Image (cartoon, coloured by chain):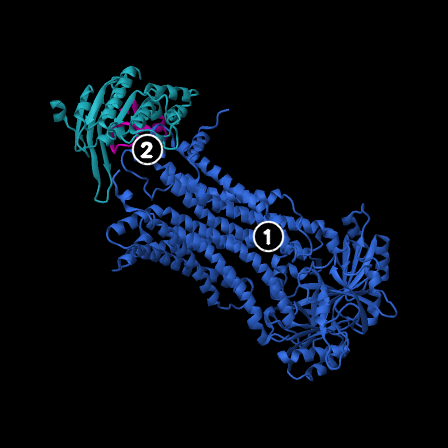
Chain colours: A cyan, B blue
Amino acid sequence: MNNLSSMIDLADVRLTLPSDAGPVEILRGVDLSVAPGESIGLVGPSGSGKSTLMAIMAGLERPSAGDVVIAGQRLNDLDEDRLARFRRDHIGIVFQAFHLVPTMTALENVAIPLELAGRGDAFERAAEGLEAVGLGHRLTHYPSQLSGGEQQRTALARAVACSPRLLLADEPTGNLDGATGGHIVDLLFELRERAGTTLVLITHDPALAQRCQRIVAMRDGLIDRAAEAAE
Amino acid sequence: MTLPLSLRFALRELRGGVKGFRIFLLCLALGVAAIAGVGSLSAALVAGLSADGQRLLGGDVELRLTHRPPSDAQRAWLAANGMVSETIQMRAMARGPQMATTTKRALIELKAIDDLYPLYGAMKLDVAGSPQDLVARRDGRWGALVDPAVSRRLGLKTGDTLRIGEVDYEIRAEIEHEPDSGTSAFVLGPRVMVAGASMAETGLVQTGSMIRYYSRVMLPPTADLDGWIERLKQAFPDAGWRVRDVRNGAPGLRNFLERMRLFLTLVGLTALLVGGLGVGNAVKAYLDSRGRTIAILKCVGAPAGLVFRIYLTQVLLLASAGIAIGLLIGGLAPPVLSGLLRAYLPFDAAIGFYPLPLFMATVYGLLTALAFALWPLARAREVPAAALLRDVAAPSTTRPKPIFIAAVAAAFAVLAATAVLTAERTDFAAWFVLGAFATLLLFLAAGNAIVDLARRMKRPRRPDLRLALANLHRPGAPTLSIVLSFGLGLSVLVTVATLQGNLSAQVAERLPDQAPAFFFIDIQPQQVTPFEATARAVPGVGEIAKVPMLRGRIVALNGEAVDPKKVAPDARWALRGDRGLTYSGSPPEGTQIVKGEWWPADYAGEPLVSFDADIAAGLGVGIGDTLTVNVLGRELTARIANLRRIDWSTMGINFVLVFAPGLLEAAPHSFIATAQATIDAEVPLEVAVTDQFANITAIRVRDALATANRILDNISVAVRSTAAVTLVAGVLVLAGAIAAGHRRRVYDSVILKVLGATRADVLRTFLLEYALLGLVTAALAAVIGSLAAYVVVTQVMGAPWIWLPGTIAGTALLAMAITVGLGLIGTLAALSQRPAPLLRND
């Protein structure tokens, strides 16, 4: 898997969900290839299918049709538990709403994926990770005792704890003020560059998207090739 | 050592406290406490009974003969093989001193003692001295020891004269404690104790009189009980005595305790099941609130199996805590409750630690927690990780995977199997489990029907009623769980209340029309005609019925000894000791022959017998089979000619066995008679008969029924208390459901207030919702509870059903009051919320 030609390979990915008013086509045939170590900014209006596409890349959602290959592994073939383990080993996710476990401390939150991976040094590594995002003094705090920025830094530390090869970030600064958001983004890119991680960043912020090597635009469940070309 | 991952995660989650689990803990603790309490108390009572076995039995072995004392050879054998004490017991009339016109009299249980009584334990009297010294003849007068009730009823005191039969006894002391009393539940009169040597003078000892001769034997400490009894049987194979030993000294009491234990355990199990619904609700509510955490765990790589284990571990940890609380409370039942029971039982409970009932309660608690928690746990397992990205909650219709559905079914099956297989009466337990299951299904269907009906009903114009109705069927409405849990608890209460009401009503209301006023026993054959003449001479005396009576034991069927273990449990009582036998040319009045033919009135030929149809079915015999009874040590065999159905509830004279003429006439026997009389005629009738015939004993039916009623009342207190536990469990679940809907109520009330509703409007809306729910639940519980009671009364007890609308309505009103009351508390809390914080966008 070290000599992959692409980290993400999506071919004609479609997703149709049932609804009271009839089936809704959310993705209508997405083709996308992302090289290892590449960073892309995924942009598009609300409802264009960005988050759903990310869910499919993370194995959180199954496509109705099409192939999803991440880090050389065809996700279509994996059952739910194998998908969970695949995520644990290869994918880090940062959410707009942080999604920390409220009953666990910052340290424990970061340690979860390491513990799931059976690492004996889970807590040492988690502490180092929190140190790296500037939260070495907040290890035993619960999410409710942390500011929004601190919560997102904790989530970031958790996302990279297992050194994933693919980092997915869904509006990571959406719930934060400008200055705090900027700091988080700096941190995100710094961590990515240090490890050479592939990054998919969903954002509404054009300036933020510009920091990525490539911008992919979505519209109505499809990659907007015209917009991509214009970028 | 590192803890397993699931335990580590579970412990972390539980650090937040158990606030949402209070109802969970209470429900489980309550049910487990009920089962552990009933089990521990009955274990302590049985242990107490065993520890006191020799005292209660009055010896290591007790031999009882009816109608006749042991023979000289038997006495010699017993004396050579142990230390023997003989007592004679019978019912008799005691009278105060003769006054001008009236004499007070009382039915007594007479006991004549010998020099060695009691072999075990000690008599406690209000004066110093041995019982033998006190009952001995002094200055030509025999002495008597009396229960204080005798003195009270006859207005006598120590030193006064008490006439029994033909003897004037001097009351020498009052009995404070009789060591071997009270193992029989049905005692018709207070005790009087006299010297065995005085009995001959009383004139009570006559042929065929209902007299029991007890020989109590104390064995050397090294004696082998079984071997001793075996040698006794070999020495006197046809003696016909009833043998009891210290291991089964009070079988009636032991059986009664065992029945009560079984019944109360099953009621406790119902409480646990009702509580189980609360457990299920609490787990579901908790897991619903954990949806996000579960999705996060899955996002960062936790497999579904791990998620399941994490939350299963939490449930098991909490269940253990609830069970531990229940065990603590239940384990304390013997020391706390045995004091209360001392007044009703002739022995003390053996206070101690009884691990088996506690273990069983733990098993029941764990199985219940699992059975009810597995479903929500299995559903939580399926929460998609994608729930985090979009607002995808697990749809409420998500079904767990088949393996988990099977696991839930298995947990219920093991629960049912445990209840049935550990019960002494498996048939009874099985019916109970089936009934509980059917009731659960019925309530489930009813709850669904209510939700469906509320949904389909035309929207009322009144907004409060419309909202109340909508609240019954909106998604996530607690209607179903409230109807199920509260309805189930309430049904048990309605059943128990109606059953008890029916039993009391049978005795109090129905019987006086038909029941005789008196039973007269020990009438000698030559006294029959003068007795009847005397009785008829009393104004107000109605029909008099009389039949010959002997006592005998069924010992063989078709020539083979009967093994009680192979007999249907319902029929075992017919084999337990002596049964009354009679003979008659014509069928007893009201006889309903279900099979075979009655013999001609002048029948002479092969000995025939008419047998009770139900008992015959239980013993597995029918027309043409032979039946052997032991009467006065002789075995008599007759062929079954017909089967009768007997209605015992008429209180008339009836016998399981009625022989054709020719077999029993020669055996020594007495007559038994019943007499109907107006209330005013009762005392004159009793005086007339017992004055003229000192040996005849009058048993007033009214008093006997009062005694039966007292026993019934005492039992019903225990039953009702346990049934109340079921209702408390139901109320807990109800409270939990109302508490769970608190956020929704707060939000609704805020919106209503914003739209201009007054506090009174809001209050009315919610109260309507609870009143509707309470009304429907109460109505259902009334129907289902009455139905259950109806089945028990008419099918199990074979008694006619008495409709008790007051009892049912009372219970239903209680339900309404509880629902509305709890709803009111919840709503007032919701009303006090300030709207602004809830409306702010955050």
- Res B798 visible: no
Q: Is residue B636 above or below residue B533?
A: above
Q: Secondary structure at mark 1?
A: helix
Residue B45 relative to residue B455: left or right: right
Q: Is residue A14 magenta?
A: no
Q: Residue at x 86, y 59 (%)?
A: B73
Q: Is residue A211 above or below residue B482?
A: above
Type of the residue with mark 2? Ala
Going from N to C along the chain, the mark reached first, 1 or 2, is 1
Residue B479: x and y in percent read 37, 52
Among the 4 quarters of the image, the one containing residue B504: bottom right
Q: Nearer the viewer, residue B546 or B808?
A: B808
For residue B385, which numbered disc appears in the image? 2
User: Which quarter shows the C terminus of chain B?
Assistant: top left
Chain letter of disc 2? B
Q: CA distance from mark 1 to mark 2?
A: 50 Å
- Mark 2: few/some/many CA within 10 Å (<14, 14-19, 20+): many
Q: Residue furthest right?
A: B139
Q: How many marks?
A: 2
Please check whether the numbered discs 1 and 2 fall on a single chain: yes
Residue B64: x and y in percent read 76, 60
Q: Is residue B536 above or below residue B798?
A: below
Q: Nearer the viewer, residue A80 or B840?
A: B840
Q: Is residue A84 magenta?
A: yes
Please provide the residue range marked out in magenta: A57-85
Q: Nearer the viewer, residue B627 or B23?
A: B23
Q: Secondary structure at mark 2?
A: helix
Residue B326: x and y in percent read 53, 44
Residue B566: x and y in percent read 64, 54
Q: Residue at x 69, y 80 (%)?
A: B684
Kindly identify which residue carries mark 1. Answer: B261
Residue B73 relative to residue B355: left or right: right
